[in-house]
Image (cartoon, rainbow, N blue to C red):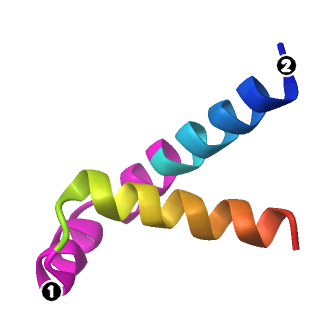
Amino acid sequence: MSPRQQKAVVILGAALVGTYVLGNVAKSQARVLGLNAAQLAALTAGVAFAMRNA
C-alpha cells in the first residue's frame, strides 16, 4: 500500500470512527454549523489527521 493510500485509509477511518463516536451529537452540531454529516465527518477527519501529524 502506498503512503498516499495509507493516508486515505487513516482519513476515512478517522471520519468513520468520529462519526460513530459522536453519533447524535455530530448530527446536531452539523445542523448548527449548517453542514451535512459527510462534511462534518470530513472536517473531523481533517482535524484528527492534522493533530496526528503535529
Q: Label 2 belongs to which residue?
A: 2
Q: Identity of the amino acid at label 2?
A: Ser
- Residue at the bottom extreme, as displayed: 32
User: Is residue 39 positioned above or below 33 on the image?
Assistant: above
Magenta residues span 16-34
Q: Residues within 10 Å of mark 1 (few under 14, many from 20)?
A: few
Cα–Cα gap, marks 1 and 2? 37 Å
Please give the name of the residue rendered at 74% of the width and 38% of the height, measured from the top-left corner: 7
Q: Label 1 belongs to which residue?
A: 32
Label 2 sits on a secondary structure element that is: loop
- To which quarter of the image does residue 53 belong? bottom right
Please give the name of the residue rendered at 28% of the width and 51% of the height, measured from the top-left corner: 38
Please give the name of the residue rendered at 83% of the width and 13% of the height, measured from the top-left corner: 1
Label 1 sits on a secondary structure element that is: helix
1 left or right, relative to 37? right
Q: In x, y percent, where is residue 18? A: 48, 57
Q: In x, y percent, where is residue 10? A: 68, 40
Q: Identity of the amino acid at label 1?
A: Val
- Badges 1 and 2: C-beta atoms under 8 Å apart? no
Looking at the rendered image, the disc whose residue lies closer to the viewer, 1 or 2, is: 2
User: Is residue 13 positioned above or below 38 on the image?
Assistant: above
40 left or right, relative to 42? left
Q: In x, y percent, where is residue 54? A: 88, 74
User: Is residue 6 positioned above or below 54 on the image?
Assistant: above
Q: Residues within 10 Å of mark 2 (few under 14, many from 20)?
A: few
